[in-house]
Amino acid sequence: MPDTAVASYTPLDRKGIARRAADDIPEGWYVNLGIGMPTLIADYVPADREVIFHSENGVLGMGPAPEPGHENRWLINAGKQYVTLRPGASYVHHADSFAIIRGGHLDLCVLGGFEVAENGDLANWATSANDTAPAVGGAMDLAAGAKRLWVVTDHTTKTGASKIVSRCAYPLTAIGSVKRVYTNLCVLDVEPRGFVVRWMVDGLDFDTLQARTDAKLNRD
């Protein structure tokens, strides 16, 4: 579904998607950020808003990425990226970290996605040797254990195929778990009636968004 005319809107970039998702995370939530685009969210939560970021390798209380030249080479997240700590942060054993996940103590998990279906199914893992995480990893536990699951992703692939679909074609990570999707074009909630459009980038209209989406969209 490539564009054939000059667009009257500007899609968000990766940082814009992360910033838009960060805006919606309430004070006091415990949040896990998945590998890739989700990790950018920690950079955009205001310093005066207490959001406790968790990483499954055993960090509780992550802050934004460090300034260049100020990296602590012993402090990384699950995606092997350098991170900082907020006041009160702590390290925990790997088993305790997964007990936080599996015990239902996370208010939110944010993951990337290859496809999200209108019933909340998520496909976000691959088996290619070229992938940095060629397995489902902890995403399966996070999707099942967190109280809420949000997905951040581009709305379409590089070839224009929709990632917002009626039914996932890729192997599933989780069944019926996704509650909200942030794309470079819009914010969608997953409800019993399917995808509901909550927000669109300036200049984008509903019909144009629907034309770029495989699944049926519902107006708010």
Image (cartoon, grey):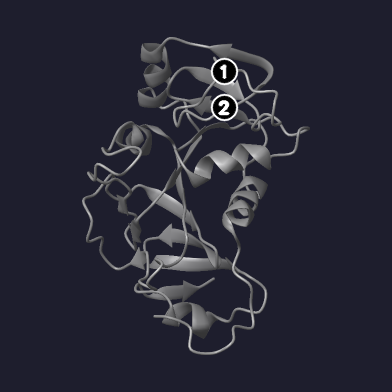
- Whether residue 129 sits left or right of residue 210 in the image: it is left
Q: Residue at 59% of width from left, 83% of height from top?
A: 7
Residue placed furthest toward the bottom: 5
In this view, 137 is above or below 171? above
In this view, 118 is above or below 86? below
Give me the disc on residue 73: 1
In this view, 129 is above or below 17? above
Q: CA distance from mark 1 to mark 2?
A: 7 Å
Q: Amino acid at mark 2?
A: Tyr
- Give the residue number, with chain letter if any, for mark 2: 82
Q: Residue at 66% of width from left, 79% of height from top?
A: 203
The image quadrant that residue 210 belongs to is: bottom left
Q: Between residue 161 and residue 69, name the one nearer to us.
A: 69
The local secondary structure at tag 2 comes to loop
Q: Residue at 34% of width from left, 74% of height from top?
A: 214
In which quadrant of the rendered image does the N terminus lie?
A: bottom left
Q: Between residue 113 and residue 134, name the one nearer to us.
A: 134
- Residue 188 point in image, percent of width and height: 49, 62
- Whether residue 84 sits left or right of residue 180 in the image: it is right
- Residue 183 point in image, percent of width and height: 51, 61
Q: Residues within 10 Å of mark 1 (few under 14, many from 20)?
A: few
In this view, 128 is above or below 17? above
In which quadrant of the rendered image does the C terminus lie?
A: bottom right
Marks 1 and 2, the one that precedes in the sequence = 1
The image quadrant that residue 66 belongs to is: top right
Q: Amino acid at mark 1?
A: Arg
